[in-house]
């Protein structure tokens, strides 16, 4: 047999590759190791096997048979490379360490893009089917067998948790933002000395025989103006009402309790009531200092803005995934352009 009898021609996507049959036998139980002339994609006239697959990826796959090293081509996306490996019967775990981080980067990219796509959807008015799906009431909704209680529960949920569902929902969202801003501003301003009032104590002067000879006024401490207390009371009444209602009508109580923003909201509201109880029924300065220290978590209520602002949610996800970089904005002020620093993928996110 001549040397030509040991060679085989594989045509992939119009590009012909020629190699030895023994080379393709190096990796058994794969598509290329099982080539026979009885296959339907064998052309006896041209004496070649034709595969309508990606020719660029196949070059790396054929090189794997020759050298035993599987490298990732940077000019194709990860899912396409995985599909090609699966078609040719190869394991993606055989990718060389030098290419592994680049190859697996697409999975994190897909996750981030999925999150950003979800954020885009959040800016649109949710359909009734989407809302019913959260409550597992799709079948009852389609058959029209929803009870009055279920209907009211869904309506109240969309009113407090879906700002884009109606005008009233937007009004509730604006009201919530208003109380958050007022509460945080009040919490900060009441610590300013110029906005505090002194606590005056009258001290009596006594002479021999315990006879009072006079009085003097002494400034003992500074206390916030009483107006700040009433403003905080109104704000926390709203936060309490909002938290209770949202808990009652939420689709899943466990998910609601695990949500970090709800936990912060609960602790911040609890510290206000603890502060009031200690000031009314206790005089222990240590307990007061502890409560005031924990009360600083009220500043974290700023995170509640993420429930009302898609732009802020996008910014937070950017901090979580620093490989995505803001490179500019569109003509629309509410549209940002993002670029993946390693894969050079551009993404337009609008809200």
Image (cartoon, helix red, strand yellow):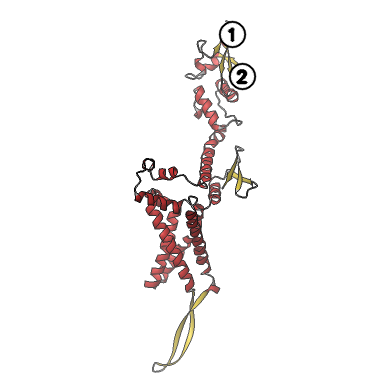
**Badge number at residue 36:** none
Counting from the top left corner in percent of width and height, residue 27 is at: 50, 20
Note whether 77 is above or below 12 in the view shown: below
Neighbours of disc 2 within 10 Å: few (<14), some (14-19), many (20+): few
Quick one: SS at disc 1? Answer: loop
Disc 1 and disc 2: Cα gap in Å?
16 Å
- Counting residues from the start of the chain, the first of labels 1 and 2 encountered is 2
Q: Which residue is mark 2?
A: 14
Taking the image as drawn, is residue 337 in sight?
A: yes
Q: Are marks 1 and 2 in contact (CB under 8 Å)?
A: no
Q: Which residue is mark 1?
A: 45
Identify the residue shown where x is 53% and y is 43%.
Answer: 116
* Tag 2 secondary structure: loop
Closer-to-camera residue (151/79): 151
Question: Residue at the spot x=47%, y=68% of the render?
Answer: 231
Q: Which residue is the extreme one toward the front?
A: 144
Q: Position of residue 75 (x, y in %)?
A: 61, 31
As drawn, 55 above or below 230: above
Question: Residue 231 versus residue 37: which sits nearer the camera?
Answer: 231
State how many labels appear: 2
Image-quadrant location for residue 80: top right
Q: Quadrant of the N terminus?
A: top right
Relative placement, left or right, of 293 versus 1 is left
Q: Note whether 6 is above or below 335 in the view shown.
A: above
Residues packed near mark 1 inside 10 Å, few (<14), some (14 to 19) or many (20 plus) = few
**Residue 74 coordinates in the image, percent (x, y):** 60, 31
Q: Residue at x 57, y 32 (%)?
A: 77
Q: Nearer the viewer, residue 81 or 235?
A: 235
Q: Position of residue 79 (x, y in %)?
A: 53, 31
């Amino acid at each position: 047999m001549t040397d030509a009898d040991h060679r085989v021609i594989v045509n992939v996507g119009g590009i012909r590759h020629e190699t030895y049959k023994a080379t393709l036998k190096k990796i058994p139980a794969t598509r290329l190791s099982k080539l026979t002339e009885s296959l339907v994609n064998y052309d006896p006239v041209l004496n070649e096997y034709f595969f309508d697959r990606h020719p660029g990826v196949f070059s790396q796959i054929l090189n794997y048979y020759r050298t035993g090293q599987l490298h990732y081509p940077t000019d194709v996306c990860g899912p396409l490379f995985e599909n090609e490996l699966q078609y040719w019967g190869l394991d993606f775990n055989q990718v060389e360490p030098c290419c592994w981080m680049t190859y697996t980067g697409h999975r994190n990219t897909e996750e981030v893009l999925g999150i950003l796509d979800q954020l885009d959807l959040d800016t649109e008015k949710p359909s009734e089917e989407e809302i019913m799906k959260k409550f597992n009431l799709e079948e009852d909704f389609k058959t029209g067998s929803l009870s009055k209680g279920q209907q009211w529960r869904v309506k109240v949920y969309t009113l407090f948790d879906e700002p884009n569902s109606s005008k009233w929902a937007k009004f509730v969202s604006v009201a919530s933002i208003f109380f958050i801003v007022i509460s945080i501003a009040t919490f900060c301003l009441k610590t300013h000395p110029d906005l505090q009032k002194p606590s005056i104590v009258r001290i009596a002067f006594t002479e021999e025989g315990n006879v009072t000879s006079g009085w003097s006024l002494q400034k003992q401490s500074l206390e916030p103006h009483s107006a700040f207390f009433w403003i905080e009371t109104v704000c926390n009444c709203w936060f309490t009402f909002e938290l209770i209602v949202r808990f009652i009508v939420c689709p899943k109580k466990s998910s609601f309790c695990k949500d970090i923003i709800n936990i912060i909201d609960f602790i911040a509201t609890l510290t206000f009531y603890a502060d009031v109880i200690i000031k009314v029924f206790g005089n222990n300065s240590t307990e007061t200092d502890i409560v005031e220290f924990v009360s600083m978590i009220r500043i974290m209520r700023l995170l509640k803005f993420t429930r009302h602002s898609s732009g802020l949610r996008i910014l937070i996800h950017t901090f979580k995934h620093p490989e995505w970089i803001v490179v500019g904005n569109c003509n629309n002020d509410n549209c940002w352009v993002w670029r993946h620093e390693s894969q050079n993928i551009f993404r337009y996110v609008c809200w």
